[in-house]
Amino acid sequence: MKLLVTGGAGFIGSNFILYWIKNHPEDKIVNLDKLTYAGNLENLTSIQNNPQYTFIKGDICDLGLVDKVMEGIDIVVHFAAESHVDRSILNPSDFVLTNVVGTQVLLDASLKKKIKKFHHISTDEVFGSLELNDMNKFTERTNYSPRSPYSASKAASDHLVRSYFHTYDLPTTITNCSNNFGPYQFPEKLIPLAITNLLENKKVPVYGDGLYIRDWLYVEDHARAIDLVIQKGKVGETYLAGGMTEDVSNLDLIKKILNIMGKDESYIEYVKDRPGHDRKYSVDWSKIKNELGWEPKYDFEIGLQKTIDWYKQNVEWWKKIKSGEYQNYYQKQYGAAI
Ligand code: NAD
Ligand code: TYD
């Protein structure tokens, strides 16, 4: 099999490529990535000389390039996206271009080349927000109700993927997963931001009252879910993947990290809230469990410990990121607060 992975230099894409090469060494992988601020080839140095792996720097919106790259591809695994909610609030246009237009370009090229499967990676954020006291969970039947420019662009991409299945019989599958965490995550997202700030003896910015709830999924478990859906998922179907069995607020999560890292609560800094901040996400992953036999292997605390260990052992990786363009972003987002 020959896979085209888009966005393979990002957090989840690079974890997926490393997972795939380990578990399917006979397959070939082409990684198409624009290398935006979030793309980092250092995530893939361990396989850069592997003859089964090829990297192509390019934009998924570039029709000519995508057509060429698609030659001989069996399966497309589409991760490439602008992925950070706060950046989508500061500048939505890149989100529409990459997440919506880029997805449509890939779908068209996949159709032309009659690829065997198009797997689209999406998010639980397309379903909008639950109330704090709502014990319902998102399921594959929940109506879409995206509320940030990021989630709206991902929702649009999901609709396009389904439309290519229904209209043109393109063999598609979609996974909508919850918040991932683990190695190689860009330190603008909550968990790596908290860990790296604490390693630098800085405070952790907590938005609003900190009582927001996310469902956390260890990235390797996510890679395994995608593998199963690619191999055994039913064409035209959507599968939700999540990692939690109980609610954990952002504040509880930060306290767990402080505890593991031996810091006290004086390292919590309450900062101004995110506009339109979704209160709660919670994912019912019974469909993928019942139909494909998937469930998370890593308990939340174990995943957190592994993630903290990774950031401790890979200081060079995140120090480089934090000393670059990141500083402008951090200043814009958090100002003089911390
Ligand atoms: P990321 O921001 O770490 O990586 C995105 C990658 O896409 C980067 O390597 C970037 O260079 C590349 N890219 C961006 N625009 C591109 C373009 N126009 N052409 C080619 N490459 C481009 O993102 P991530 O966290 O790894 O997320 C991957 C996918 O998973 C995204 O589709 C995201 O919506 C989805 N997702 C992420 C999470 C999460 O918690 N991180 C949760 C649910 C869904
Ligand atoms: P984030 O990692 O940005 O993921 P998403 O917005 O896609 O869920 O944020 C996770 C949660 O943490 C979300 O409720 C916003 C909150 N948050 C903070 O409290 N402080 C921060 O500095 C960041 C980045 C996020």
Image (cartoon, helix red, strand yellow):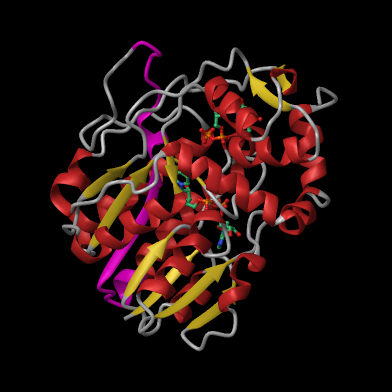
> In the rendered structure, does residue 63 fall within the stretch colored magenta?
no
Image height check: is 319 above or below 125? below
Residue 243 locus on image (x, y percent): 36, 39
Residue 7 locus on image (x, y percent): 52, 62
* In the image: residue 139, left or right of residue 44: left
Image height check: is 256 above or below 192? above
Image height check: is 124 above or below 117? above
Image height check: is 121 above or below 16? above
Q: Is residue 157 visible?
A: yes
Q: Is residue 276 visible?
A: no
Residue at left offset 32%, top offset 14%? 134
Residue at left offset 18%, top offset 62%? 232
Residue 324 locus on image (x, y percent): 82, 52
Quarter of the figure that contains the N terminus? bottom left
Quarter of the figure that contains the C terminus? top right
Q: Quadrant of residue 78?
A: bottom left
Q: Tell which of 281 and 307 is nearer to you.
A: 307
- Write the start and end of the magenta stretch as one range: 110-133
Q: Tell which of 303 and 318 is nearer to you.
A: 303
Q: Quadrant of residue 258?
A: top right
> In the rendered structure, does residue 130 fall within the stretch colored magenta?
yes
Residue 186 locus on image (x, y percent): 64, 49
Residue at left offset 60%, top offset 43%? 93
Q: Tell which of 262 and 99 is nearer to you.
A: 262
Q: Quadrant of ligand 2?
A: top right
